[in-house]
Image (cartoon, rainbow, N blue to C red):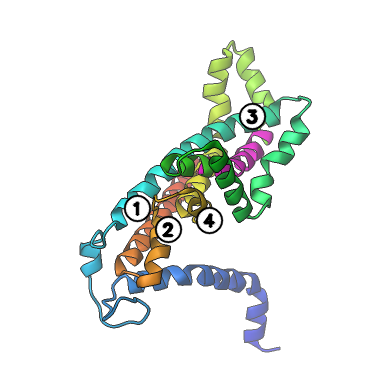
Amino acid sequence: MTALTRWIRRNLVVIAGIGTLAYLILPNVVVLVFSFNKPNGRFNYAWQRFSTDAWTDPCGVADLCGSLSLSLKIAIWATIGATVLGTMISFALARYRFRARPAVNSLIFLPMAMPEVVMAASLATLFLNMGVDFGFWTILIAHIMFCLSFVVTAVKARVMSMDPRLEQAAQDLYASPAQTFLRVTLPIAAPGIAAGALLSFALSFDDFIITNFNAGSTVTFPMFVWGSAQRGTPVQINVIGTAMFAVAVLCVLVGQLAGARRKRS
């Protein structure tokens, strides 16, 4: 057995992890590179020449920034709604025993288990039967319904891992129920709530299938990208995608640094 073979066997897990990470990041690298491209025609699929025109004018394509701002607005409100409702449901399922608890536990995970197109078609049928006009509110309601299960999963796992003796100790020290919740329970559950909120925002901002069924004439950013791909993808889409990826990486790094600082202190 050669030295190279022994080294590969010792570091096989690390090599596999780096390879998987590179495979996941490669599409983002391609998007970054082509955000500096200046294609000759409408399609930004082949490298022509370096240019920063798209970065200096990211809203140069009609309706691009309008659809982006709409997606951000829907994602923010859907995150707030799903996080508030999901947190309350998680505490109810983790802390209380009631007759319908097993049924609620099963039903809450159905949106995660079923194909997304089924939920999209079901919600569209519901809105049609109710005579609701498709638009911002139908998209928002659909996104909250879709994201709710993911928030419940994240928060419930955190709540169930909490030590109840901490809350009992706060009560022994004459803390009121509100003080116990705000100063003990909520800070401990905060990482799960934050994880559910971030996941909810990403799912809402990125969603196309549910939005396409329930949007009517409203155009969100994923729908704008899909429509543009039929006629030729503008470089500005790569710019927006790169910026969103950079923001996500920055949030992760800030979270890691904050966690490391808390451990040191």
Q: Residue at 28% of width from left, 83% of height from top?
A: 48
Q: Which residues are magenta?
A: 143-160
Foreground label between 3 and 2: 2
Q: Quadrant of residue 104?
A: top right
Q: Earlier in the sequence, mark 1 or mark 3?
A: 1
Looking at the image, residue 112 lies above or below residue 38: above
Q: What is the distance, in whole Å, between disc 3 and disc 2 at their CAs?
A: 36 Å
Residue 86 rendering spot, x and y as whole percentages: 58, 35
Quadrant for the N terminus in the image: bottom right
**Which residue carries the number 4 mark?**
209
Q: CA distance from mark 3 to mark 4?
A: 30 Å
State the residue position of label 3.
Answer: 91
How far apart in space, not on screen, are marks 2 and 1 (Cα)? 8 Å
From the viewer's perspective, tell me whether residue 44 is left or right of residue 168: left
Which residue type carries mark 3? Phe
Taking the magenta stretch, the answer to whether it contains residue 145 is yes
Query: Looking at the picture, does residue 211 appear above or below residue 96?
Result: below
Across and down, in percent, residue 181 comes to: 56, 22
Q: Can residue 30 be spotted in the picture? A: yes
Looking at the rendered image, the disc whose residue lies closer to the viewer, 1 or 3, is 1
State the residue position of label 2. 223
Q: Which mark is residue 67?
A: 1
Residue 265 in view of the camera: no
Which residue occupies the extreme top position in the image? 174
